[in-house]
Amino acid sequence: MNFKITLFLLLSCLMYNTAQAQTIFGAITVFTENEQDSILPHVNIELYTKETLFVSQMKSDSVGMIMFKNVPEGIYSLKADIENYKSFLLEGVIVGAGMISFVTINMQTIEAFELKKRKDMNCMYDMRNSKPKCPICNSKKEVIPYVYGLPAERLVKNEDQELYVLGGCIVRQCRPLWYCKRDKSDVEKR
Ligand SMILES: [Zn+2]
């Protein structure tokens, strides 16, 4: 890992404010890495809206970096693909006006993925796309989704409701998708 990238990673949990306060656009910077946290260049990245409309497509460069500029604020999905690796869909990437969201995607080889599957070392988190019941309180009422990219407060507030929980910027295949506010706990599989 070279110095430039190390520095970027150190900064990757900082938000960036542009001079134009009025802007409704932000940006997403994506770093692509392999499971050993080394640079994985030339990963194809597709950007979609929350409603799964295609926005843009780019390939990460030779240092495994890519930037989507002028993205209207909102919540997005990223789909990452490269030969011999398991396709990665990251939902809940949050873009704030005048800010750059940083996301590091760790790609897993198909071989490693299949090996993990066979060993039944599957993820402990409930990975369902639709809101699951919390196994602790047995209710969906206080369950909110994770968003990735913008590390402000742990719970992102919207009109005094806590609607999202921040998952940080380094994202693996196995990651929490849901959080129970009542039990202050990630929703795990039953
Ligand atoms: Zn609960």
Image: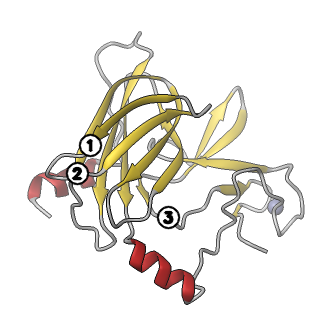
Judged from the image, the secondary structure of the residue bearing numbered disc 3 is loop
> Residue 131, how many percent across, how many down?
77, 51
**Residue 173, label in figure:** 3
The residue under the point 82% across, 69% down is 135
Q: Amino acid at mark 1?
A: Lys
Q: Nearer the viewer, mark 1 or mark 3?
A: 1
Q: Quadrant of residue 17?
A: top left
Q: State which image quarter holds ligand 1.
A: bottom right
Camera-side residue: 131 or 5? 131
- Residue type beneath disc 3: Gln
The residues tagged by marks 2 and 1 sit, at their Cα atoms, a distance apart of: 5 Å
Q: Is residue 17 above or below residue 31?
A: above
Residue 162 is situated, as x and y percent measured from the top left of the image, at 70, 40
Which residue bears the numbered disc 2? 42
Q: Residues within 10 Å of mark 1 (few under 14, many from 20)?
A: some
Say what amino acid the circle numbered 2 marks.
His
Q: Tell me, yes or no, whether the two marked residues, 1 and 3, touch with CB atoms within 8 Å.
A: no
Q: Residues within 10 Å of mark 3 (few under 14, many from 20)?
A: some
Q: Is residue 91 above or below residue 9?
A: above
Residue sitting farthest toward the top: 22
Eyeballing the image, is 84 above or below 23? below
Secondary structure of residue under mark 1: strand
Foreground mark, 2 or 3, reads 2
Q: Position of residue 101 (x, y in %)?
A: 39, 38
Residue at 46% in and 75% down: 113
The answer to whether residue 139 is left or right of residue 33 is right
| Residue under pointer 1 | 59
